[in-house]
Image (cartoon, rainbow, N blue to C red):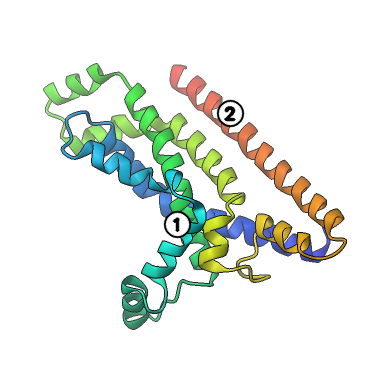
């Protein structure tokens, strides 16, 4: 049984990672589908923009989010004026920062799944006058299902470990934005906090390993169903 403080940190981590994944997944599927089309105009530019969070330091990503979505930022001021929504230093902001960081990982996994599909099936469907949306919903998505599922689980595990962008944009507020990596960082700043940091690190490691094992299991199971 986890102590109450550690259980709260774990719940916050799951909440942030879940919101990030749910928010990022539809856009990742759309972006991956576009990137899997070899003749799409501006494909290289879109690919570069999507993978910027991988290249840039996470702290810089968090700072850019703060500039854009902070109270004085263009998007932040607009959201607050229209909807009364404030993202910086909130759980929603932590989820946004996490979503931005896991987005390239999601797109990469899903794109590979789309590209692995047999193009002859789509050509045959087009000859039978199936529209682009029909081909996407009834063929592309089911065929890419194992890759999408595995990518989502892996991205969730990665979201549980996001640090730099979250602490910059959402701070380290216990009960609101303090996820496992932020909690480890916080206790390491205290004298004698090594033992608590080790416990939190073991929890983080266990969650990450469970996510990776689940991704592999779900991917194999989905492939067996498709083959059978």
Residue at coordinates 54% horizontally, 40% vertically from top-left? Answer: 153
Residue 216's disc number: 2
SS under mark 1: helix
| Cα distance between the residues tagged 1 and 2 | 30 Å
SS of the residue under disc 2: helix
Foreground tag (1 vs 2): 1
Question: Is residue 1 among what the camera can see?
Answer: no
In screen coordinates, is 192 left or right of 153?
right
Question: Is 83 located above or below residue 17 in the figure?
Answer: below
Quadrant in the rendering for residue 55: top left
Find residue 194 and report its image quarter: bottom right
Q: Residue at x 76, y 63 (%)?
A: 189
Give percent across and percent down for residue 169: 50, 66
- How many numbered discs? 2
Pinpoint residue 18: horizontal percent, then vertical percent. Answer: 54, 54
Which is more toward the observer, 23 or 173?
173
Q: Residues within 10 Å of mark 2 (few under 14, many from 20)?
A: some
**Vertically, is 21 above or below 193?**
above
Q: In the rendered view, would you say 89 is above or below 12? A: below
Do the residues under discs 1 and 2 have CB atoms within 8 angstroms?
Answer: no
Q: Residue at x 21, y 28 (%)?
A: 38
Residue 178, x across and y down, in percent: 65, 64
Q: Is residue 66 left or right of residue 94?
A: left
Q: Is residue 227 visible?
A: yes
* Residue that badge 1 annotates: 61
Look at the image and tell me in which quarter the N terminus lies.
bottom right
Q: Is residue 220 left or right of residue 106?
A: right
Q: Residue at x 52, y 43 (%)?
A: 155
Label for residue 134?
A: none
Question: Camera-side residue: 71 or 218?
Answer: 71
Chain-order first, disc 1 or disc 2: 1
């Amino acid at each position: 049984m986890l102590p109450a403080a550690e259980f709260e940190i774990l719940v916050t981590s799951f909440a942030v990672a879940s919101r990030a994944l749910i928010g990022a997944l539809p856009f990742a599927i759309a972006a991956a589908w576009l990137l899997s089309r070899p003749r799409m105009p501006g494909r290289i530019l879109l690919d570069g923009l999507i993978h910027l969070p991988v290249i840039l330091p996470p702290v810089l990503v968090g700072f850019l989010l703060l500039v854009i979505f902070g109270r004085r930022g263009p998007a932040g001021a607009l959201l607050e004026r229209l909807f009364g929504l404030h993202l910086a230093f909130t759980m929603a902001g932590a989820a946004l920062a996490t979503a931005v960081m896991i987005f390239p990982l999601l797109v990469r996994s899903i794109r590979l799944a789309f590209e692995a599909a047999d193009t002859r099936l789509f050509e045959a469907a087009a000859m039978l006058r199936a529209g682009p949306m029909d081909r996407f919903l009834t063929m592309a998505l089911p065929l890419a299902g194992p890759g999408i599922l595995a990518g989502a689980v892996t991205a969730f595990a990665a979201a549980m470990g996001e640090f730099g962008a979250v602490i910059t944009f959402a701070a380290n507020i216990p009960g609101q934005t303090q996820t496992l990596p932020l909690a480890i960082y916080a206790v390491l700043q205290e004298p004698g906090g090594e033992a608590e940091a080790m416990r939190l690190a073991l929890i983080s490691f266990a969650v990450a390993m469970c996510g990776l094992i689940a991704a592999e299991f779900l991917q194999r199971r989905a492939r067996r169903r498709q083959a059978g």
